[in-house]
Image (tube, rainbow, N blue to C red):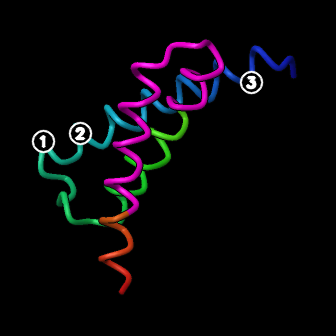
Amino acid sequence: MRNGLFGEIVGWYGAAAIVGAYALVSFEFVDSGSLLYQLLNVTGAVSIMYISFKKKAYQPGVINLIWSIIALIAIFKMIT
């Protein structure tokens, strides 16, 4: 798989994961305190962060860095 294609797949996964997480909470399929919601957020944010920094689009990269930190803190609080 070409490196560029891999990055695009990762980026699109990130977008789908974050929007999917938001939809799941908005339509009350999961609770915002659920592990699934937080895992979708952290993996989605890290994926978008990867493609953003790779393309030198730093604003979405930084936002998603912060987003992933928030999700990781929430996951940490859940498991401790």
Q: Which residue is mark 3?
A: 6
Which amino acid, by three-letter code, is at mark 1? Ser
Residue 72, percent across and down?
40, 60
Q: Quadrant of residue 60?
A: top left
Q: Which residue is mark 1?
A: 26
**Mark 2 secondary-structure assignment:** helix
Residue 26, percent across and down?
12, 41
Please state which of residues 61 and 45 is positioned toward the viewer in this rendering. 61
Which amino acid, by three-letter code, is at mark 2? Tyr
**Majority SS type along the magenta span:** helix
- Per the rendered image, the range of residues in magenta is 48-72
Q: Is residue 10 above or below residue 38?
A: above
Q: CA distance from mark 3 to mark 2?
A: 24 Å
**Mark 1 secondary-structure assignment:** helix
Say whether residue 53 is magenta.
yes
Q: Which residue is mark 2?
A: 22
Residue 3, percent across and down?
82, 20
Does the CB distance between marks 1 and 2 fall below 8 Å? Answer: yes
Which amino acid, by three-letter code, is at mark 3? Phe
